[in-house]
Every structure is written in structure tokens, then in C-alpha cells.
Image (tube, rainbow, N blue to C red):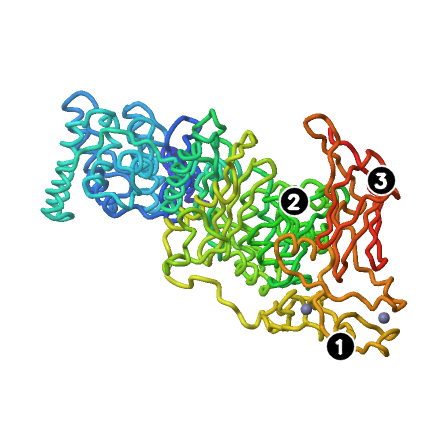
Amino acid sequence: MQYLKKIKPWQWGVITFLSIALLYFAIPPDNPLFNTEYSTVIRDEQGDLLHAYINKEEQWHFPPSEGIIPEKLKKAVISYEDEAFYSHPGIDPSAIARALYNNLKEGEITSGASTLTMQLARMRNPKSRSYFHKLLEVIDALKIELHYSKEEILNLYLNHAPYGGNVIGYQTAAYKFFGKKPQQLTWGEAATLAVLPNAPGLIYPGEPSKLLEVKRNSLLKKLLDRGTIEELTYQLASIEPVPDQFITFAKDAPHLSRFLKMKYPDQKELNTTISKKIQRISNQIAEKHHTVLAPYSIHNLSILIADTKTGAIKAYVGSPDFFDAQHNGQVDGVQAARSSGSILKPFLYALSMDEGLILPQSLIRDLPTYFDGFAPSNANKTFQGVATAKEALVSSLNIPAVRLLNTYGIFQFYTFLKMAGVSTLFRSADDYGLPLILGGAEVNMWDMVTLYRALANEGVVQNNSLLKEESSQQGKQVMSAGASFLTLEMMKELVRPGSEYYWRRFSNQQQFAWKTGTSFGHKDAWAIGVNPQYTIAVWVGNFNGETNKNLSGASSAGPILFDLLQALPVKPGKKWFIKNEMDFTPKKICSLSGFAATKACTEVDTVDAPYFMKPLRTCDYHETRYFSTDGKYQTCSHCWDKLGAVEKSVTLYAPDIAYYLRENGQYIEAIPRHFPDCPRYKSEQSIEIIYPNLDAKLFLPRDYDGEIQEVICKVGNTQAVEKVYWYLNESFLGSTEENHKMAIHFKPGKNYLKVVAENGSEDSRTVFAQVKE
Ligand SMILES: [Zn+2]
Ligand SMILES: [Zn+2]
């Protein structure tokens, strides 16, 4: 301890000072160096700017991205500001000495001698230019150099440098002055951005600054002299005009940008999956159709396009004009819940296949139908009798869809929708009831794109994604791959609108599976479709919910869908979904009914059925019956000893089906009646009242004079019946032959209708009638 005594007080002072200095420099500077509230920047899949939001200080200051500073800008800045940047420790003593000498000579502070690091220190703490503040800058610069690499320092400098007006940072400046990504800057532009931070006042709108041009060109000359650029580059760069305006940032996807900004308020950089090219195509097509639709008082439409496989959203158009306040342009139609119309139908058909209820060839009844207070009707108000599942889906027939839902189960279908991510079902399954399949529920475009993609991805549902970093989640199998494929094959047959009508003639026409939807009262028009590359959804209507008779899925939304399909870039590769043989199993079906063939079926086809479907329902259109040798009568064990028993397969349409098939001009052969002398003769049920429906309340219309009008009642028959006798409340009304229908005056309240066939078979029902007010 002896040597401590030898230290003199002044030496103690030096030691203390050095220790404090060491400690000071050892403590890292604030992290981060800047506490900046950045602007929010929304980028497309290529990193191109889609949208930007000004920060709280009303500045355009893009967040420093991880991106590398472009080489041209780096070289230009170092040449201009600080050629010794890579070799000095934060300060450049020779430059300081030179500056000090000059300043003393001039009597005021003119030249800075500031290194880039010292300028960075000043940006952190802007003060007046005094010697004392200069000293503080020097200390801070030394400290920064101790804790940051040269690359980090350059990055911080360029990201916080002022470029004039409210433009901060080189990335912002590249977009604001040149409208491009920093990586795309030319030498002339890079030189301009190198010069500006020390003369940010040199840029103002309206007039290119001569001084800025002089400064830029002298930097370019320096770069030429140093051999950084070649003569030709120098010549071309120095004749580039200097910027004389602040470019307004593009607003290519305003609804999407607002949606993301609200969802991720703290994320200043949002890198989306949007393709600027596809977004712009969609914007243009939206605008074009908006112009066409507006004269019909249709003012809004929305578009959502996703990559079918990955679910990455490629275009997002919330409304044709975000800034059209008069027509609620700010409403985001992609997220808005609207009536689904018929666009949920394809899923019911796919699920019904898996359940063994149908195949595309199977017949579904298309007749007046009444379910507990609900009587669906087809758009064209007609009844075909029966339609194949494919026909019913392609023509979007409502009655077969409602009947199918009734058989499949409303609760099961509702559960499927929930499981598949439909987020807008706020009521219970019972509350929606069967109208669910006709647009009774509201859905949004986002969920519908998810759902339609599942058809294309072998029945696996997986979320869409909007941000590049969103990891794709595990999908859920909600339908079989086979049923999904068969449903797409059906949807491919939908007739395309307008000029697309004859699309099959053009070999280059892309295959596309799609579906339209029109909501009740013509408020919403939908068209959604898929191919292996794109899933496209279009909605047309008015955000204020106005009905408009001009609105329909096929005529309003369909043309937009196909305009998009034509305009979108096509990737080489598979044009249509590949049928995987593993997903199918051969099945023998009745050629007439499309159900599993029985021995009675006269013609049988073998078709591919989904491998995982439950056993298909058997055909009940064909039966084996016995006939007398002369073919005149049906026989049975009670009477065939006398007459003979010739076994024959017969086609038996239910009476109601037969009635409507005949109405539509189809010849339906009535099979011979049973032998009249046989005890079984009377019990053969051969006629049936098919209208009014059982249990339905009948509404009696009034004519112009206020008189209650007649109602056309109908009776169907399968076996040959020559005459039907009609009775109302036990009084005889008359008889009919062949196609049995009769106009009847019902009284309000309870009525009793009875029909008797000549063979004695009969049908009757109570009809509750009410006057329609
Ligand atoms: Zn059959
Ligand atoms: Zn018999």
C-alpha cells in the first residue's frame, strides 16, 4: 500500500477522470438510439409500397427495414460526407484541425468537419452550433463508434437523415421524390439523396433547384474522378432532372391497409401477400364495372382474390372507390356480412355425396314443397318434377336444395359451416332453418374464399393469409377429396355470362368452377369460383342494403368474375385439378335415377363415386311386378293362377313426380292396373292429392273485385286410372280424366277435400284456407 501514498492529489484527479470516462464509454448509448414513432408502411409481396400512413408528428418516416442500403447510395454518401468513414474512430482529427483553423480565420463557425457519426450524434440531439455542443457531439460520436459497427452507423444515419419538408430517412425519400424502392435508384438519384440531408431546404415543389443540381453534379464529378462511376454513367446522371415535387403515395389497397393497421396497431411495417399487379388489375376492373353499374343505381362492389393452394391473398378491393363518401365507399365489402344467396349450395351437394344421399347423377324432387311454414320456390317459378343433382346445382334450383338440406340435416350442415370457419353465424341452426341454404344467413367474402378453396384443396379447409410472415396452419378435412372433386366438376358446367357464353369453343379458355348467388329481394349479387391457381370472389350491391331488381349473381357479378379471370396472369402448370384415382371407387348406379342399382333397374351405369362416401341410397324408381299373360292387368298370388304371372321390371314414378313430368310434356307410361276382381284391387294405392300440400295453410287470393278466387288442385297417379271423382266437404264437384286437376272454391277455415279413383282407391285431406289480405 506504500505506493498509493506516492500518488499526488493531481494524479488522483487524473485517475478519477479517466475512470469516469472509461465507465462512461463502457455503458452503451440508449438502445435504440432514436425513439421514433415511425409511419406505418404497407408493402406488397415484392416489397413495393401499397400504402403509407403519416406518423403522429405528421412526418413521413418509414421504419428502418432490415434491408441492405443500396450500394450506389452508400458510395455517394461516403464520398460526399465522410471519405474517411471506414477508417476513423468517429472523429476525424485532421478535418477538425482544418475546420478550426478556417473558423478562427473567418471569426464564425462555417465549415463543419463533422463525420457521419458526429452528424448521427447531432440528429439524436439537435442543438445550436456552438463549440460546447460540438464537443458533446464528439463525445457521443466516440461512444457510438464503440458500440455500433460502421454498417449500423451508416444505416442509422441514412434512416434518420432529414430530406426536406416532413420527409425523414432515405427509404421515405426514395418513394417521395422518385416513386421507387431504394434498390431501384439511379446514380443521379443516389447522388441527390446523398446531398440533401445537409441541404434539405433545397427541395421544394414546383421548381427544380439549380443549387441542388450543382451540388449533385459536383458529387457525381467526384465519383467519376475517384473511378466509382464511368464517364457514360456520369454524363447520363448529370442530365437527369432534380426532383421538384413530393410524390403522393399510392393508395392501391386502402381497405386492406386500414384493416391491417387496425388489426396490428404496433406493427409499423406490414409485408402483405398482395400482388400489386393483380391488385391494380382488380382496381381497374372494379372501376370499369362501377361505371357500367352506376346508372342502374348499383354503387358498390368488392373483389377478393387468393392463391388457391396457399390462401395468400393477391388482391383486396373493399369498394370501387374508397373516397366516394356519398355511396359509403369506406365500407369494406370484403369483411361485411351479407346474405349468401345460393353460394353455400355446392357444399351441401358435396356433403350429401359423402353421406350417401346422392351422386351427381341422382334425381332430386323438384315439386311444390312445404316444410313447416316454409314453401321454397325456384327463381323461374316452375317445377320440373325431378332434376339430377348436377342439374339442380348448375341451374341453382332452390327446391331440390331445400329438400336435400332437409334430408341431410340443418344442424349437421350448420355444424359444418361453423367448423369450416364461417364466422358470421350468430343465430342457432333452428333459428336459420331450411332457408339457410337459400341465403337465410349472412356470410362474408373472406370466409367464402376460405370455403371455396377447400373444394379445390381436396376437402381440406385452411385459413387465408394476408401477411407474409403468417405461418400456414394445419388444415382440417371437412369434405372427402372425391366429393370435392365431383362438386368442382359439376360447377365447371355453369354457363358463363355474356360473351363468355360460348367459352367451350375457344381452346385457350381456362377451366373454372364457379357459382352465383342472388339474395332475397335482389340486395346482393355474388359470383365465386376456383381453378388451381386462383380463387376469385365478387360481390355487387349497395352498402345501404337497397334492393335493386337489376341485381343478379349471373348478370351483375358474373361478368366481373370472368373479366378478372381473363386479365389475371396465368402461371404455367396444371390447368385443372387432377383426378386422383385413389379418391374414387366404381359404383353401379341406375341410369334413370342415379341411385344404387337394384335387380329391378333396367339400365345400369358404372361411375366413379367418392371412396369415403357412405353406401349410396338404392333406386326406388324401379320395381319388379307381375302381369297377366295378356299384359292387361297386374296380378298377385291371389289372382295369378287364372291370369298368369309374367315378371317385369317397371318404372314407377311417385304420383307427384309423374304429374309434373307430364305437365312438362314428358310421356310417362302408366302401368296397367291390378286385376279388378282380385281382393287386392282396391288396396292398391294409385292416386294422391299433390296440391294443396299436406298440413300447409292455403292462402286464398282475391281478384280485382275482391272476390275470393279459385285454387287449382292436383291429383297424381302412377297406375292407369281413367277417372277421378272430386268431393269438397262431402259434396261432389265433378270428375277428371288423364291429367287430374280442378279449380276449387275453398271457404276460409277448415275444408275437407277427397278424391276417389274408379278402382276405388282414394285420398283425402283437411285443407286450412285463409284469405290473403
Ligand atoms: Zn333404377
Ligand atoms: Zn291380385
Mark 1 falls on what kind of element?
Answer: strand
Residue 120 lies, in percent from the top left, at: 32, 35
Q: Residues within 10 Å of mark 2 (few under 14, many from 20)?
A: some
Tag 3 near tag 1, CB within 8 Å:
no
Query: In the image, what residue type sits under mark 2?
Result: Ser
CA–CA distance between discs 2 and 1?
Answer: 40 Å
Q: Position of residue 123 (x, y in %)?
A: 34, 31
Q: Would you name the residue on which mark 1 appears?
A: 647
Q: Nearer the viewer, mark 2 or mark 1?
A: 1
Left or right position of 460 against 215? right
Closest to the observer, 596 or 334: 596
Left or right: 528 in relation to 184: right
The residues bearing labels 3 and 2 have C-alpha atoms spaced at a distance of 25 Å
Q: Which residue is mark 3?
A: 751
Q: Please tell me the numbered disc located at residue 13.
A: none
Location of mark 2 (residue): 377
Can you tell which quarter of the image residue 203 is in?
top left
* Amino acid on which disc 1 is placed: Glu
The numbered mark, 2 or 1, whose residue comes first in the sequence reads: 2
Q: Residue at x 16, y 48 (%)?
A: 228
Label 1: how many residues lie within 10 Å, few (<14), some (14-19) or many (20+)?
some
Quadrant location of the C terminus? top right
Asked where in the image residue 677 lies, by quadrant, the reply is bottom right
State whether residue 48 appears in this view: yes
